[in-house]
Image (spheres, rainbow, N blue to C red):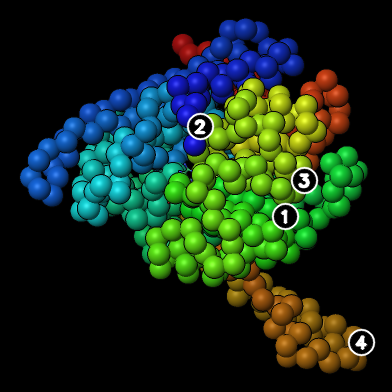
Amino acid sequence: MTATRPNFYANVSRTFDLAAAFGVYPPGLLDQIKRCNSVYLMEFPLRRANGSIDVIRAWRAEHSHHRLPLKGGIRYSPQVNQDEVTALATLMTFKCAIVDVPFGGAKGAVQIDTSTCTDDEIERLTRRYTHELVKKNFIGPALDVPAPDFGTGSREMAWIADTYVQLRPNQIDALGCVTGKPVDEGGIHGRTEATGRGVFFALREVCAHTADMQRLGLTPGIEGKRVVVQGFGKVGYWVARFCDEAGARIVGLAERDGAIAAPGGLDLEQVKQHRDATGSLLHFAGADTLSRSADVLELDCDVLIPAALEGQITASNADRIRARIVVEGANGPTTPEADEILHAKGILVVPDIYANAGGVIVSYFEWLKNLSHVGFGRLEKRYQESAYGRLLSTIESATGTTISADERRAVIRGADELTVVNSGLEEIMAVAYAEIRDTLLRRPEIRSMRMAAMVNAINKVARSYLSMGVFP
Ligand SMILES: NC(=O)C1=CN([C@@H]2O[C@H](COP(=O)(O)OP(=O)(O)OC[C@H]3O[C@@H](n4cnc5c(N)ncnc54)[C@H](OP(=O)(O)O)[C@@H]3O)[C@@H](O)[C@H]2O)C=CC1
Ligand SMILES: O=C(O)CCC(=O)C(=O)O
C-alpha cells in the first residue's frame, strides 16, 4: 500500500482551495470554513492483560461548529495520526453539507493495533477514551456525536454509549451521544450496511444517465458492470453485495494481506464463508490470488471502489488504473495528483464526500430516533395498513373485482423502520447527486465531480456562516 499519510490534510486543503476559487466568498470567510476549529489530543494509560502499562494516544478533531452537534466516526488504527484525523474531520463537514445533514464535521481516532489487544483491553480503552471526551465536553448528543469508522463497529459504540450514560445518568437524550449502536442498544435498523448501500446508490445514480455513460464507453445501469472492491469490511462488503444483487459482476476483492481476482465473477457469500473460516480472502477456490494487495486497483474492470484507506490511488499507480468509474467508498483514497491523471484518462471519479455519505445519513436518522425516543414507523405502520386496506376495499366494490390475499398483503404493508431508513437514504443520495450534476452542467468550467461536490458544500457552509454572523 502506498503511504501518503503525512499529506492527507494538505491534500484535503488543496481540494478545498481549488473549489473555493470557483466561488465569490471573501478570503476570511473561506479561511474560517477551511480551518479545523479544535483538536483534542489525549494520552492515557492502558493496563495490558499481562499487567504492563501502555500509554495510548488518541484524538478528537472538531472541524466546524457551524452546525451542532458535530458528527464523525472513530478510527482505531496503529498508523493514525493527528494529520489524518484532522483531514477526516474536515471531510465530514463538507460531506454533511452535501447531503444536507445538519451537523458540523468531526472525527476521532485511537492509535492502537487492535490485533494485539484482547477484547477486554479494547473495551477498557474505549471506555477510557469516552471518559476523556466527556471530561472535555467533546462528546454529547448536543455537542459531538461519534460513530463507527475504520477499525471500530457497533460493539465499540455500545461501550461508548454505556460509559456516557453511566457518567450522565440524568440526561434523558444520553443515548444520542453516539450512533452506529447495536439495534438493541438504541441503534437503528440499516446503519450497519448504510455506507455500502449509499455507495451503491451513488453508483446507481451515476450509471442512470445514458449520455454520461456513453461518454465513458459504458452502457447505462449497474447490471453487467465488472466491479472491483478494495476492502471487504463494513463498507466494502456491503457495497460489493448490493452491486452483486443488482446484477454487477464482482471481479476483484482485496484486503490487507492480498487480493483475489476472477474475471467471471466471485460468489460473495462463498468468499465470505472462506474468509470467516480461514481469516483471509486468499486462496479462495475459483479465483486467482494476488499477493500484492494494491494490484487489485489495476485490474481490468468498469467500476473500481476503493473502500479501505486513504492514499491508495496516487501519482505512482493512477496511470495504470483501467476502470472507467472510480467510486470512493473510503475517505481520501485518491490523491490530488492522481485525480488529475484519472481526469486526463477520462475516468469518472465519484468523490468520497458524496459517495460514502450513507453512513452519516443513517446516523442522522439514528440520532433523531434517540432524541424522539420512538422508532421510525412504530406509530403509523398499523394506521397506514388499515388506510390502504380501506382503499383496496373501496376499489373492489367500485370495480366489482376481487383483489387476492397475496396482492392485498403486498399493497397494504405499512412501512417498518428499515423501509423508512432505506427510502430516506435513497432519497437523500439521489437529491444530492442531482445537485452535483446540475452544478457540473451549469458551470462547464468546473470539470470534475469532486470540484462540483465541494463547490456545493462550500456554498452551503458559507451561507450558514453568512447568516449566522461572527460571535461576539
Ligand atoms: N464505516 C463507515 O460507516 C464509514 C467508513 N468510511 C470509510 O471507509 C473506509 C473503510 O471503512 P470501514 O469499512 O468502516 O472499515 P473496516 O475496518 O470495517 O474495514 C476495513 C477494510 O479495509 C481492509 N484493509 C485495511 N488495510 C488495507 C490495505 N492496506 N489494503 C487493502 N485493504 C485493506 C481491511 O482488511 P483487513 O481486515 O485485512 O485489515 C478491511 O477489509 C475508511 O476510509 C473509512 O473512513 C466512510 C464513511 C463511513
Ligand atoms: O456515521 C457517522 O456519523 C460518521 C461516519 C463517518 O465517519 C464518515 O462518513 O466518514
Q: Residues within 10 Å of mark 1 (few under 14, many from 20)?
A: many
- Report the residue at 58% width, 43% height from top: 295
Q: In front of the other: label 4 or label 2?
A: 2
- Depth check: give the residue in front, 105 or 367: 105
- Total tally of numbered discs in the picture: 4
Q: Is residue 171 above or below residue 93?
A: below
Q: Which residue is mark 4?
A: 399
Q: Position of residue 433 (x, y in %)?
A: 74, 41
Q: Is residue 312 left or right of residue 127?
A: right
Q: Which residue is mark 3?
A: 206
Numbered circle sitting on residue 2: 2
Distance from disc 1 to disc 3, alpha carbons, whole Å, reads 15 Å
Q: Is residue 246 above or below residue 97?
A: below
- Report the residue at 17% width, 40% height from top: 46
Distance from disc 2 to disc 1, alpha carbons, whole Å, reads 24 Å
Asked which secondary structure carries label 2, the reply is loop
Q: Is residue 11 left or right of residue 345?
A: left
Asked which secondary structure carries label 4, the reply is helix
- Report the residue at 59% width, 67% height from top: 286
- Report the residue at 40% width, 52% height from top: 153
Q: Is residue 394 left or right of residue 296?
A: right
Assess mark 2: CB under 8 A from ligand 1? no
Q: Residue furthest top?
A: 27
